[in-house]
Structure formats: C-alpha cells, structure tokens
Image (cartoon, rainbow, N blue to C red):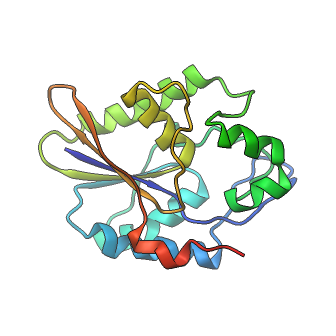
C-alpha cells in the first residue's frame, strides 16, 4: 500500500496559552490545505489525522472531497502537543533561536524522549499500514516531527529531524506485505510552491 504523509498547513502563532497550545490555521494555511484535494485526488482508501487542530483543519478539505471524516489517531500528535506555545518555523529563528539551532542540527528539543516518541509514532503508523493491505492509498495528516521521526526510523538515521518539511509537504512511503518500507518521496511541494513564501 501507499502511505501518503502530509505535514499540516501553516498555523497561527500562540504564546502563553495557559494550557496546551492548539492553534488554528492562518488564512494562508487554509489555502494551502485546500490545494491538497487536487494534489492527492480522491482515489484514497482512508484518511487519518492527528488530533491537533492544525492537522484536523488541514485534513478537512480532503475529507469533504472524499465525503468522509478522518479517523483521529491520538498517537500521531506532535512531540510539543502539551506546550503552552506554538511558533511557526519561519518565525523560530527570531522568536526562539535555541530551538531553531537544535532543529537546524536535526535534533528534537532536549526534553523529548526520542525513543519513546519514535516508538509511539511507529506503532501508530504500522497499525494503519496493517489495516490496509493491498494497493490502497492511505493519507495521514500529521506533523513535521511525526513524519521526520518515522523516516529516520525507516532509514536508520541518527538525527530525528533529518529533513526540512514544508507546510502541506507530501511524503510517500510504500509499505509491502513482506514488511519492507520504501521511501518514495519526501516533502513534495509543487502544489503549494506559490504559498510557501512568508514575510
């Protein structure tokens, strides 16, 4: 089967939410999410999403085109799901330079238990793969950390954030019945090239 992994679209910046930050999409993010319908088509056997608002809103236009709601998978939430703030990546160098430097080095924040996060993500995605044998295409809308960590796991990479992933970037993994996982593409952005320039 083909597993299509989509990073969510551009969300709002949130500071000091007083609880877990769960930002909505910006107007630009909504435009990015709408482009996924043409980019992915409707020959999709199933649609899954992280429970976070930015992922669910990104999945919404495709869900409407498919005529079905995405299945929410709590284990696909991002490593920062409990943080009281969210800084879009294009603002991170200015707002949180330490986090930006760790990300540039391919590292998750120091407080993240990387093996546990990797195990959670891998188990969730492998359950999805097991539920769809054959040649089906399944779409999963999640987060840069989720996608990156699984790619690092599949490819045997030491750094969990090896790939820069753009908002609504598309990554494709072929999953064989024999257990093989073939990464076919990483961060396809042709559908949103004109929507990835931020001021």
Q: Position of residue 193 (x, y in %)?
A: 47, 73
Number of numbered markers: 0
> Is any atom of residue 13 visible in this view?
yes
State the residue in front, 43 or 197. Answer: 197
Residue shown at the point (83%, 57%) measured from the top left:
94
Image quadrant holding the C terminus, namely bottom right
Please tell me which residue is depicted at 68% across the width and 56% down the height of the picture.
89
**Can you name the residue that lies furthest to the top here?**
115
Location of residue 182 by image quarter = top left
Residue in view at x 60 percent, y 77 percent:
28
Q: In this view, does 79 lie above or below 36?
A: above
Quadrant containing the N terminus in the rendered view:
top left
Lateral position of residue 127 relative to residue 76, left or right: left
Can residue 80 be spotted in the picture? no
Left or right of 179: which side holds 53? right
* Up-down relation of residue 57 to residue 109 (above or below): below
Based on the displayed image, in which of its 4 quarters is residue 179 positioned? Answer: top left
Please state the horizontal and vertical placement of residue 51, each as a whole percent of the image.
Answer: 54, 49
Q: Tell me residue 12's x, y (percent).
A: 71, 66
Q: In this view, does 35 lie to the left or right of 66?
A: right
Compared with 159, 148 (above or below) is below
* Image position, residue 98 (x, y; %): 82, 41
């Amino acid at each position: 089967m083909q597993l299509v992994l989509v990073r969510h679209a551009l969300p709002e910046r949130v500071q000091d939410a007083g609880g877990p930050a769960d930002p909505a999409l910006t107007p630009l993010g909504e435009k990015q999410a709408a482009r996924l319908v043409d980019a992915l088509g409707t020959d999709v056997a199933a649609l899954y999403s992280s429970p976070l608002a930015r992922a669910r809103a990104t999945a919404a236009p495709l869900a409407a085109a498919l005529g079905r709601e995405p299945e929410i998978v709590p284990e696909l939430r991002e490593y920062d799901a409990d943080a009281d703030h969210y800084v879009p990546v294009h603002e991170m160098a200015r707002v949180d330079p330490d986090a930006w430097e760790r990300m540039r080095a391919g590292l998750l924040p120091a407080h993240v238990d990387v093996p546990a996060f990797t195990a959670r993500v891998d188990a969730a995605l492998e359950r999805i793969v097991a539920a769809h044998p054959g040649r089906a295409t399944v779409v999963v809308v999640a987060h840069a950390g989720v996608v990156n960590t699984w790619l690092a796991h599949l490819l045997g990479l030491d750094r969990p954030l090896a790939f820069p992933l753009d908002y609504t970037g598309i990554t494709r993994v072929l999953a064989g019945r024999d257990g093989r996982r073939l990464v076919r593409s990483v961060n396809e952005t042709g559908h949103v090239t004109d929507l990835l320039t931020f001021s």
